[in-house]
Image (cartoon, helix red, strand yellow):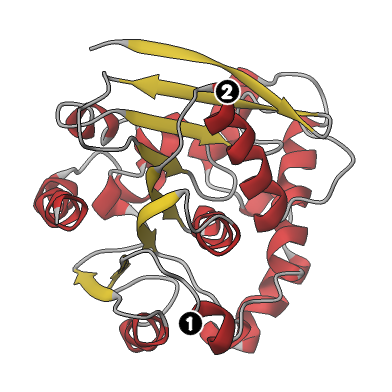
Amino acid sequence: MTFTHGFAGTNGLHMYYEVHGQAVPGQPPLLLIPGGGSTIGTNFAELIPLLAEQRQVIAVEEEGHGRTQPTSRPLTAENSAGDILAVLERLNVDTVDVLGFSAGGHTAVALALGGPSVVRRLIVASTFVSRDAVPDEFWDGMAEATPDDMPDTYKDADRLLNPEPGHLERLFELDRQRILNFPGWTAAELGTITAPTLVVSADRDVVTAEYAARMAGTIPGARLLIVPGGHGDYLGEQAASGGDLRTMHATLPFLLRFLGE
């Protein structure tokens, strides 16, 4: 399998990207956007080799995450969507399918809204699009959270890539403020998404299956997939799966089927 990586710069930020596999005629690359606190590896290391057997995969790390260093900007879905457009321009890619996980799903939605000609098909996994998706206790807990609340998997990965003092704390604060300040999108805004969309959630996820169904009903023509599991184990996410990849292997055919329709 071919592999390349690099950085693309825009507005003072240099976004890290990886390209796995070769371009497949008639199929755009699949863009993967990890969730908060994560790296490409912690979210998608198990999934990428399986995907790249069938199509080219581009994976990115958002500001402050992994190899993409933080700037003075706030971390927002819209800022990250602009960073991703710079990556695609660097790679001479006009169109992609997109899979965004958790907070990365916010970026995927922002990309589909801001660049409808860029996103052919959209998968939003274990994410939400409005603040009423979660109870008040979620927001209270986020307001009081500290880096100690991060999964050890995420902390270990960041310290391995960025051992300098303060980096982990900066990463945590970027993500915390991103969620606390998340405005959500109105039904009217979501109604302008033109990319065929698959909403994926687990039955023991951050949001309920009922909310995921409501979200799918707001995006025109969206499909819904509820899988048995937790927050990201069905993608092989390391903190959630704990190395048990059975749910990932069961879910993958549904994702590939949607992307291939």
Residue 218 position (above or below residue 39): below
The residue drawn where x is 10% and y is 51% is: 253
Amino acid, disc 1: Gly
Residue found 48% across the figure and 59% down from its top: 102
Kindly give the residue lying farthest to the right in the view shown.
72
Q: How many marks?
A: 2
Q: Does 109 sit above or below residue 222?
A: above
The answer for how far apart the CA atoms under marks 1 and 2 are is: 30 Å
Q: Which residue is mark 1?
A: 191
Q: What residue is drawn where x is 75% and y is 50%?
A: 75
* Residue 236 image position (x, y, % from top left): 28, 43
Q: Which quadrant is the C terminus positioned in?
A: bottom left
- Which quarter of the rendered picture does the N terminus lie within? top left
111 in relation to 2, above or below: below
Q: Quadrant of residue 208?
A: bottom left
Mark 2 = which residue?
90
Q: Which mark is residue 56?
A: none
Query: Could you say which is closer to the camera, residue 87 or residue 246?
Result: 87
Residue 182, percent from left and from top: 70, 70
Where disc 1 sits, the SS reads loop
Q: Residues within 10 Å of mark 1 (few under 14, many from 20)?
A: some
18 left or right, relative to 147: left
Q: Is residue 107 visible?
A: yes
Q: Position of residue 130 (x, y in %)?
A: 58, 81
Query: Of residues 147 and 55, which is closer to you in this image?
Result: 55
The residue positioned 72% from the left and 49% from the top of the image is 79
Callout 2: SS: helix
Q: Left or right of 168: which side holds 72?
A: right
- Residue 13 location in percent, x, y? 77, 30
**Amino acid type, label 2:** Arg
Q: Is residue 259 left or right of residue 60?
A: left
